Image: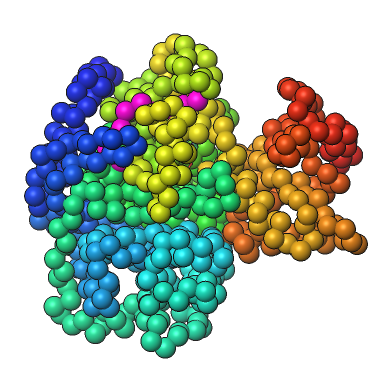
Amino acid sequence: MEQYREMYERAANEPEAFWSELARNELSWFEPFRKTLEWNPPVAKWFSDGKLNACYNCVDRHVEDGRADKPALIWEGEPGDARVITYSELRKLVSRFANVIKALGYKRGDRAIIYMPMVPELPIALLACARLGVIHSVVFGGFSAEALKTRIEDLDATLVITADGGWRRGKEVRLKDAVDAALRDCPNVRNVIVHRRTGSQIEMQNGRDLWWHEQEQQLGAQGDTCPPEQLDSEHPLFVLYTSGTTGKPKGILHTTAGYLLGTMMSTKWVFDLQENDVYWCTADVGWITGHSYIVYGPLAAGASVVMYEGAPDYPAFDRFWAIVEKLKVTIFYTSPTAIRALVRQGDKWPDSHDLSSLRVLGSVGEPINPAAWEWYYRVIGKERCPIVDTWWQTETGGIMISPLPGATPLKPGSATLPLPGVVPEIVDTKGNTLRDNREGYLIIRKPWPSMVRTIWGDPKRFEEQYWSKVPGAYFTGDAARRDEDGYYWVLGRVDDVMNVSGHRLSTMEVESSLVHHPAVAEAAVVGKPHEITGQAVCAFVTLKKGEWDTGALSQELRQWVGKEIGAFARPEEIRFTDALPKTRSGKIMRRLLREIVTSHAVTGDVTTLEDMNVLASLSTQQDEE
Ligand code: WT7
């Protein structure tokens, strides 16, 4: 703890000296940097005159430094197949695939969409892009063709990397079909490279669609090497779309050096990473957690990374624990939603496995409730393993607030203290700093290396969204409180963003999908508390005039949203109503709807409500259910 305090002080007092020293010592450079930080709010440039390559840092340098035969990826397929890929094998596989992309004419600055199952070819595809300076954007395999299309368009991508399908709960997720549907409206995509995973029948469009393995075979032996491009520190590494407060997702841009340093250092600090650790983060690479803590952070640190393709409950509720036992996992990082879902199934599932290899447990994506924390600590960690509750966001790139295992005294439910170099603050609506134990907005005062650089194609939205609430400071969109020990308690979002299973979802995105349906006049969506997923989507819907069978329509609308966004966005509940509560200016009062789904009592200020009767009838509807 003393060491942490010292480091924190140093980083706070001399941030540039602190970060430049780490960047020099921990990253491998083709050309060293001299400038540490150029900060013209909201535009940050870190280590800008240096040159490096993220893929080289994650792969090649470990081969050269004595980790050639160390497992880099330890993969478990859902059906029970498995693969171990060493660092030297990874270098070869990544180089070969980079050569495939290169041979097709793709080069630095081009954009590639990656839409794949959790197979080794997924990190290989990311790293191959990074090797060439091709900007990647992974779209989570649970997103629909429609969502895929809007991302391809926004990014003006010319390459799509996908697979025939992937396995989830024993069923095939047919990814290539979705790509085909999306590409009907995307003429700028020149190629689709398809990895064969399931072997099922798919369409291959002549000239456009190419099999990964066939392209590789054509390379011959010289395909095994591919020199990594020497890229600027601020060269865009990837864009990852995340939900904002409007219907349109934001393309969060991360660049090379700062992101890599932030994710690598946080991996080492937060998980106390040691040379022989077997590290497993259960997230999907389609989300930021997978980018930062399956691919870039742990691989830059030279770790052995476990990757699992499928569902935690397949073929049975002990799949996670069976993998921990089989692979002797030492560090395990998952979401409160996964923990809550497994708590329900009882202790017999973990109790039937040897979990004694575990050393550190992590939690991410949403606040962890005390009951889930206790179970995780007692039944999984056997009261031996510290739990690191890590607070961060797609935009922060890496973990910001978290205990350091073994050092930071834990308080269940608190992400505890900021990492070195992170300067959070709690402010009121006017941006004034609040005293301890007051609830307010969580902001970050100082720039940090892995911070979001902009929103792809929309610097204005970037500035408005994150930097205008408190000028010059980063606005997180979360409410939090700091207690008398300086510990942070993150309370949840203050904007119209829901958190379902640790995945961010915009109320407006679901609303705009619902109003596209011919039967729907208006829709208002709120998150309602849910025992397992934290929040669930609840939609209030008014219908256009006509005869509607609301029973059938409820199902249809759920499927509709599944088709427009993805199955995970489907409303759990749809309430049909004659009108929605609005202010005089016509704005839907989501706060009131939130209160209706949270409790029966409606409290707070309702003086701006246009029609109190609407509210009364909405509450009654709940009473009747
Ligand atoms: C939002 C970010 C962080 C990667 C996965 C989600 C919530 C995240 C915690 C935590 C309480 C948390 C916040 C944040 N959140 N971690 N440990 N305790 N809340 O990334 O989709 O960008 O969502 O997730 O509300 O703003 P994301």
- Residue drawn at (18%, 44%), measured in percent from left and top? 48
- Residue at (32%, 28%) from the top-left corner? 446
Is 514 within the magenta?
A: no
Residue 482, how many percent across, how many down? Answer: 46, 18
Does 153 appear above or below 263?
below
**Quadrant in the rendering for residue 557:** bottom right
Q: Position of residue 22 (x, y in %)?
A: 17, 35
Vertical order, 110 against 198 (above or below):
above
* Rendered-image quadrant of the C terminus: top right
Residue interval drawn in magenta: 440-450
443 in the magenta segment: yes
Residue 570: image location, x then y, percent: 66, 54
Front residue of 193/16: it is 16
Q: Residue at x 44, y 16 (%)?
A: 433
Q: Which scheme is used to colour this image of the protein?
A: rainbow
Residue drawn at the location 22% of the way across and 27% of the way down: 15
Label total for image: 0
Quadrant in which the N terminus is drawn: top left
Residue 322 in view (yes/no): no
